[in-house]
């Protein structure tokens, strides 16, 4: 690998109750992207490039067509994250799961040179925070989403004006954005990324503090990035307090990076060239997270 001291980094996750949306809509070709994304987005936070991915699909009854659709998404996720799909497992659980039910999980292993691990140790007051746009709800908070919209009985297919003409089902099933190529582009260009946070379950309030070190905290200006319409709809429909929204969902920002202020403009240009919508959303300041 051309590294002085290679370190393996691994991550494992599943899709969660977003799977129920896929089952209700009988659309199974994108949730595999979510599964890969939840793993590789975590390990890139440490600066590790994903090497390979394996999946585990549990089902009540093995429907080859449906399994093929699921694996199509997993394959696409691996392409997007530039890692190999080296295998997997499909297990039938008759009597334990209904025939039409299934669950998807997986894990990925990546590699990084020890001296290039991103661990927050170089984080400093004055570092800027760069936010990478999300594609929607991603793969977290779906138990609340399903309750808010009563998805078992909701109209999931009709276009909605509040969602720009998209249906509720289409919007909610939008795959999780994979940020691996973008972060790798920054590192390759020599941008000194000090810390990274993948905004998953727990939203801003639980994930951003994880990238901070003692004596430092984040100051984020919510006016610096657009809030996606789906979150406005969830908040209004569910009567959910704004703080709870930012403590549950990504609210339009799927990953946050901390880096030196003098490299902010360069980083934004690199991210734009990599196809990302990126925003300078705040800074690191002294204080307790």
Image (cartoon, rainbow, N blue to C red):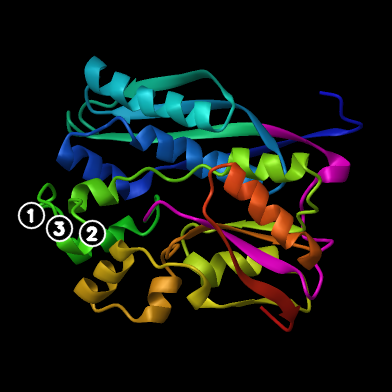
23 relative to 245 in the view: left or right = left
Q: In this figure, which residue is indicated by the disc labeled 1?
A: 153
Residue sitting at x 21%, y 66%: 148
Residue sitting at x 27%, y 32%: 28
Q: Are marks 3 and 2 in contact (CB under 8 Å)?
A: yes
Q: In this figure, which residue is indicated by the disc labeled 2?
A: 163
* Callout 2 secondary element: helix
Location of the N terminus by quadrant is: top right
Q: Which of marks 2 and 1 is in front?
A: 2
In this figure, what is the number of numbered marks? 3
- x and y, in percent, of residue 283 in the image: 68, 74
Residue 160 numbered mark, or none: 3
283 relative to 189 in the view: left or right = left
Residue 12 visible in rendering: no
- x and y, in percent, of residue 154 in the image: 10, 55
Q: Measure how far apart labels 3 and 2 are at the Cα level.
A: 5 Å
88 relative to 73 in the view: left or right = right
Q: Quadrant of residue 120?
A: bottom right
* Callout 3 secondary element: loop
Q: Tell me if mark 1 has few (under 14), some (14-19) or many (20+) residues whose alpha carbon lies within 10 angstroms of its own.
A: few
Residue sitting at x 77%, y 55%: 119
158 relative to 231 in the view: left or right = left
Vertical arrangement, residue 232 with respect to residue 46, above or below:
below
Residue sitting at x 78%, y 74%: 126
Q: In which quarter of the image is residue 108?
A: top right
Q: Magenta span covers which residues? A: 110-136
Q: Tell me if mark 2 has few (under 14), some (14-19) or many (20+) residues whose alpha carbon lies within 10 angstroms of its own.
A: some
Nearest the eye: 209 or 278:
278
* Callout 1 secondary element: loop
Q: Measure how far apart labels 1 and 3 are at the Cα level.
A: 16 Å
Residue 1 numbered mark, or none: none
């Amino acid at each position: 690998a051309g590294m002085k001291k290679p370190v393996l980094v691994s991550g494992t996750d599943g899709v969660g109750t977003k799977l129920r949306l896929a089952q209700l809509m009988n659309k199974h070709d994108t949730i595999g992207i979510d599964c890969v994304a939840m793993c590789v987005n975590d390990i890139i936070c440490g600066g590790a490039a994903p090497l390979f991915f394996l999946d585990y699909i549990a089902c009540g009854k093995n429907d080859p067509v449906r399994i093929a659709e699921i694996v199509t998404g997993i394959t696409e996720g691996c392409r997007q994250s530039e890692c190999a799909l080296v295998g997997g497992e499909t297990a039938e659980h008759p009597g334990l799961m209904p025939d039409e039910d299934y669950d998807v999980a997986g894990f990925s292993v990546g590699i990084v040179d020890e001296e290039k691990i991103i661990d927050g140790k170089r984080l400093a007051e004055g570092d800027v925070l760069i936010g990478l746009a999300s594609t929607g709800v991603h793969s977290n908070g779906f138990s609340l989403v399903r309750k808010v919209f009563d998805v078992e009985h909701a109209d999931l297919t009709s276009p909605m004006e509040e969602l720009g003409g998209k249906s509720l089902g289409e919007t909610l099933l939008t795959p999780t954005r994979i940020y691996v190529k973008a972060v790798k582009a920054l590192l390759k260009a020599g941008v000194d990324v000090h810390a990274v946070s993948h905004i998953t379950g727990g939203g801003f309030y639980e994930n951003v503090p994880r990238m901070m070190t003692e004596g430092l905290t984040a100051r984020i200006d919510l006016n610096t990035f657009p809030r996606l319409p789906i979150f406005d709809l969830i908040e209004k429909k569910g009567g959910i307090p704004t703080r709870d929204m930012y403590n549950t969902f990504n609210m339009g920002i799927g990953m946050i990076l901390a880096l030196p202020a003098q490299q902010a403009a360069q980083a934004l240009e690199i991210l734009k060239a990599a196809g990302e919508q990126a925003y300078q959303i705040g800074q690191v300041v002294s204080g307790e997270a």
